[in-house]
Image (cartoon, helix red, strand yellow):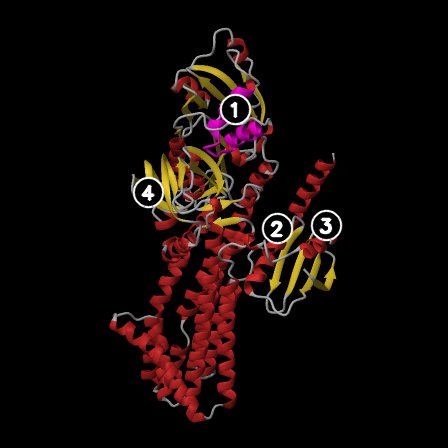
Amino acid sequence: MKCQILHESPGRLRVHVMRPRMSLREADILEYYLRRLQDVREVKVYDRTGDAVILYRGERSGIVRALARFRYEGNESLVPERTGRALNRGYEDRLARAIAERVINVLFYPAPLKIALSLIKSVPFLLRGIGCLLRGKIEVPLLDAVAITSSMLRGDFGTASSVMFLLSIGETLEEWTHKKSVDDLARTMSLNVDKVWVVVNGQELLLPINEVKTGSEIVVRTGNMIPLDGKLSAGEAMVNQASMTGESMPVRKTVGGMVYAGTVVEEGECRILVEQEAGSGRYDRIVRMIEESEKLKSETEDRASHLADKLVPYSLGGAVLTYLLTRNPVKALAFLMVDFSCALKLSMPVAVLSAMREAGKYRISIKGGKFMEAVSDAKTIVFDKTGTLTHASPQVVDIITFGGEDPNEMLRMAACLEEHYPHSMANAVVKEAKKRKLRHEERHSKVEYVVAHGISSIYEGKRVFIGSYHFIFEDEHCLIPEGDEEKFRNLPEHFSHLYLAVEGKLAAVILISDPLREEGPAVIRELRKLGIDKVVMMTGDSRRTAAAVAKLVGVDEYFAEVLPEEKAAFIRREHEAGRKVIMTGDGINDSPALSEADAGVAISAGAAIAKEVADITISEGDLYELVVLRKLSMRLMERIQENYHFIIGFNALLIGLGVASILPPASSALFHNVSTIAIGMKSMTKLLPEEELEREKREEEKGRLLKAGTAA
């Protein structure tokens, strides 16, 4: 692609694409292509001018080469279904038209035409006011209708026109902000499944999702997300449909039952006949759920919204009382031109949705303002260990076999079973088999997953179990082969153990390195500074391993060898003590606790059911996002309180000035609407501007360490 460098400074380039015009689609393709480049920190493409602003780290030569190689053709797949660009363009054009029409009206239209247009434009406002009366409600539309009607009856069509213009602009900005925030949030929550198990000639093959066509049969098991819409052709499952309905209770699905993309198999196994290829259905359902769900409203936001409606009768009453006492309609209009509810109802949801959008820039996905309030108020945080306090990508260190078994064959067997249930330990086994070039085609019958315990199946005619010590020895009563007792007692203690048993006898112990996240201790210290006074770790791992990790990371309490229901029971006890709780985890066994907590936080690399049940998802790359989440939530609550006090104080001042005849009605309306828009715009500003710089420093440090490690 030919382009011209318009301006450059260290770490920043502005380039112009040398072509007559750029479509919205082409702008998206270029932007998403540049975002994928390793050294690009941020990029913005302006389709109107054909320019791209690129912020980068390192050398500019790599960016220039990438621009030279770029072609629109072949890069279309990089762009998601929705990007928000078309939505923004629609509202930008709508606002520009409204302002242009207003300027032309004021400067060029004759007085009779202005009066006629004011009368026509007042009709929707009057109808909304009448609608409130017919419903027996005294709300903001009624206040607006009375204010506009009063001005026109006095012959002050200029004031009426100004009020309607400002109200329309305010409504457009509110609608734009809300839709943009919902759109951004929906895209962060949209389905992110790359591959799916497909039945081909009786065998299960792991294929890219975009290769799956209508009529294909796919297999989905416990803990996995259903990637496409379809009907059950075999099996049955309990399906969590929270992403579609908002209801977290699982629904039983049997043969012939319809299932939808984005829902999760909580228990069971099923085959699904695909009826709709990868498309927009999932996105549309998420948008509908967000817009309809009360989850979006925090308690503080909800109280402000109700207060806004309650203040309307007082505004009307104040206007009537002022007129009766002064017989001055201008003073009475002071109450009608200024209302508290407009600003309250605009600024509160805008603040929440903007905070949720800002969180998305830190790779934090939040399902509603309610959960940010819970994070702000929480005093207890509970951590799972594996994949949360430790890295989500552990590695197989060794395979110790028993009964004369071959290590590679045992690893092949383990990988064959574990690849169906993506968890950090399972991923480590599959990765090691791939590293050793061990092919592990389907050699087993139906795989059964026992939550928080392990997997059982028939492998080449033999009964096989793989999982925890508790599952292998206490639940399934497997035995250690005779003569191998000493080897078993001398297993290294500083690794996590995955036990494999064949035909009732221990066949292998897979030793897995499960290193602590480097940032873990610092994150816990920061959370304490931010008001968290109780940090707990709960794990199904052994007491020995749990004690070692707890000491290193610095938690207040730890619980080892716990079952999923025991994690949830601990959170219930905290609730009984009057404490709000954050739960952080990544596995299927964390799902009950994530659901029970006031704010459940899942790690993005974890099980699909954990992410579905959780209220918040953070990326697996950096646990520091929990600190960002806490700061962001606390700042949001502070902003809501600041907005509330400003709105009440400023609007009360305007009413006072109007009643004292210091401000005319038109000026009161102007100041009120300008302040409403201003508070809305302020609510859209970043809550953590300083955090971006800190994140950049952390990412640069990680990059430096990675390059140093590669060079070594």
The front one of 256 and 99 is 256
Mark on residue 36?
Answer: 2
- Amino acid on which the number 4 mark rests in the picture: Met
432 part of magenta stretch: yes
First in sequence: mark 2 vs mark 4: 2
89 part of magenta stretch: no
Mark on residue 249?
Answer: 4
Residue 260 in the image: state x and y as whole percent: 37, 47
SS at badge 3: loop
**Picture quadrant of residue 269:** top left
First in sequence: mark 2 vs mark 3: 2
Quarter in which the N terminus is drawn:
bottom right
Residue indicated by mark 3: 58
Residue indicated by mark 1: 412
- Amino acid on which the number 1 mark rests in the picture: Arg
- Amino acid on which the number 3 mark rests in the picture: Gly
First in sequence: mark 2 vs mark 1: 2
